[in-house]
Amino acid sequence: MMKGLCAFLFLFLTLSYSFAQSKVDSALIDTSKNRSALPHTADSPIIADAPIICSYISSPNLSQVQYASSFVFKPTIGLGVGMFSFYGDMYAKHFQTPMVSRLAYQLTITQGLTSYLDFDFFVLYGKLSANEHFSPNNRNLNFESSIKSGGISLTYNFDNFLPSNHKANPFVSVGFESFEFLSKTDMYDKYGNKYYYWLDGTTRNMAENDVNAINAIEINRDYTYETDIREVLNVKTDGVKRYPEHSFALPVGAGVTFEINDYLKFKLGATMHFTFTDYIDGVTSSSVGNRVGNSKNDNFMITSFSIHYNLGSKKKEESSIEENTLYDNVDFLAIDANDQDKDGVTDDKDSCQGTPLGVAVNSHGCALDDDGDGVPNYKDSEINSPKSAIVDSKGVQMNDSTIAYQYNVYNDSIGAFAKVEMYNKKGSEFVNPNQKEYMVELGRFKSGLTPEIMTKFLSINDISSSSIDDSTTIYKAGSYVSSLDAEKRKQECISQGFADAKVIYLKNGKYYDATVNNATDSKATIVSATSSDIKTTNPIIKTETPKTAMDNQALVFRIQLGAFHRRLSKNVFKGFKDLIEVKTDDGLYKYMTGSFKILDDAAKQKVEILLNGYEGAFITAYKNGKRITLTEAGATSAEKTDSITDTKDSSVTNSVNKELIKFKIQVGIFKNLPPSDKAEIFAKIKGLVKESTVNGLTKYFVGSTDNYSEAIAFKNDLVKNFGLTDAFIVAFFNNQAISVQEALELLK
């Protein structure tokens, strides 16, 4: 059959080319009947003995040539993939659920006849299969058939009714095809045992009514389709002679095409193939016993998406025809005299386009630079810099230390002056093991913080916290690429009362002490201090902060998200990059976000947080190491939207919207499609949804409730009614997976 398809394709291409050539020739020959009607001018007279085509070349009217060239064969090639679904004698409703459909592949060659009508040649390849199990008549039939198809069709896309700027086209199609089918059935396992399906749902090696049925053993199907269905069907049992494994069909389809650009289109569609055979599944109306089928032919449908590439762009042809007249109305004299930036130098002589209006320029249109430092006068903050001096972007001379620092940045090859972000193929960020992140350590704690220390920490505007093991939390200030910047921040922290503040850095997931003896990070002395060998250190905090430090300590507003008896995972607070976790000495875990200098900024951020499901979030204020009320922070009665005096630091608070907490039942997780027995069960469960994971697995869920007791009852029903003993309850907050224990904590 494939040889026939190749011959048909060759004939189609030859006829299309001949058809296009004849159209061009006829368009030219028809004009010879009346040469005097051809357009011409004194500059392009018609010569009696000249070929007719010369009159077209000299003529400015090219409409007829454009019409003829639109018929040149420039096909569109399409490649697609989809799902084959079977409609035949199998299953109670004679159709197949999409979950057990098989892959199919499609190649299409399209020639446009008009803007709304296309002629298509296509080939299809794929497999059809069906497996009955626990069917009402207990016949348990199965088959797999390889389909190879080729044919032609006409497609109508409604282009003559749609607006000219549309990007999506619905379409319908109808055609004719020839196809081969090689159908086989799975009757034996790999050891040669024939399958017998008992009424109790098991598969055994003997019939249930066999005299030795008591000795039958249970076997499993191997889903290897080894038996030609034509060997099963015969005249004696089914009244069927050996039939040919090829037939014809009428494909009827519909869908929509999306135009990406002049060359690419994306097509979604479904096509039903109405065949002229009833032998694809091996079940016919002539069959006997429980194998008898109906008299209708077997059909199949492909639901597919495909990409189509146009080998010739119509828009490009039209633009090339008008190319000779593109500059007919251009005033080149006006262009020559144009001065876009109004600096008195025409654009053709202006070497510095875009000079600001009113700035003095030289004969080349460039702004004056009296000291010759490369920074024009109107940008130069030091207009009389010494000759040959090295200056910054503002024209100010740089000292030796600044030059050395910028040179190190420019010449950096080890990442000492630049932060490197690395991502994997899936777009997830991971830490560069060679990248150092410097910060100032304020203290490490295995026990909770006292209220005095907690408020002192929260008064630091760039405070952050990290858990380095199950019981130790480290509190840090700032984040820097350069150890010099971290050292400056350390001195500020010491002046604010943190006498034991020290510079540390994070590398490859571990924290290290850093002693900076020189101006570059490469000369730093490193002392290993991993989480496994570190001892808990409480910072020495002076009770009396120096007056100068207190004056420089800014007012800090934060937003509290909740205080809980249990530590919660990051999924509960996903999206808060500046989340702070503080464990208090009374066993509470407090979660806060944000660091704002102005109350209005904190209020705006709080509105966003409320909309994201944290409806109980509230603003707190800290200054000089103490928590203060919003009134003390300077808020007026009209501005004060939160009362913080009623909520103590030792109070349990929960800001989350409990309606966003959902319990679902997970019934399976698979790398590929579920096994046939699972797929049959899943098809009977209403409301089943699936979700793909980042590692390529697919999870299947059913149900959604905010009541844990209802979730338990629903899971028990699934076990009882469908035998899904491995089903279990999972929890979500705002569509993010959390543990069931965390969900119950949030519901308190």
Image: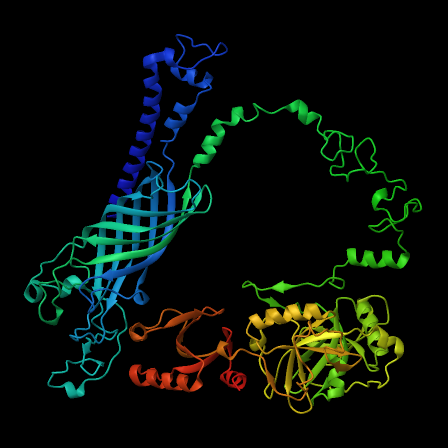
> Is residue 731 among the parts visible in the rendering?
yes
- Residue 628, located in which quarter of the rendered image? bottom right
- Residue 166, located in which quarter of the rendered image? top left
Residue 188 x %, y %: 21, 72
Q: Is residue 95 left or right of residue 525?
A: left
| Residue at 56% over, 70% down | 611
Way the structure is coloured: rainbow
Q: Does 526 sit above or below residue 45? A: below
Give whichever of 256, 283 is nearer the camera: 256
| Residue at 83% over, 46% down | 379
Residue 540 x %, y %: 82, 86
Q: Is residue 487 left or right of residue 313?
A: right
Number of marks: 0
Task: In the displayed orientation, state which residue is furthest to the front.
Answer: 637
- Residue 524, located in which quarter of the rendered image? bottom right
| Residue at 74% over, 29% down | 346
| Residue at 11% over, 58% down | 242
Q: Is residue 193 left or right of residue 327?
A: left
Q: Does 663 sit above or below residue 22? A: below
> Is residue 434 among the parts visible in the rendering?
no
Task: In the displayed orientation, state which residue is furthest to the bottom.
Answer: 586
Give whichever of 199, 46 is nearer the camera: 46
Residue 275 x %, y %: 19, 53
Residue 538 x %, y %: 77, 87
Q: Does 409 sit above or below residue 192? A: above
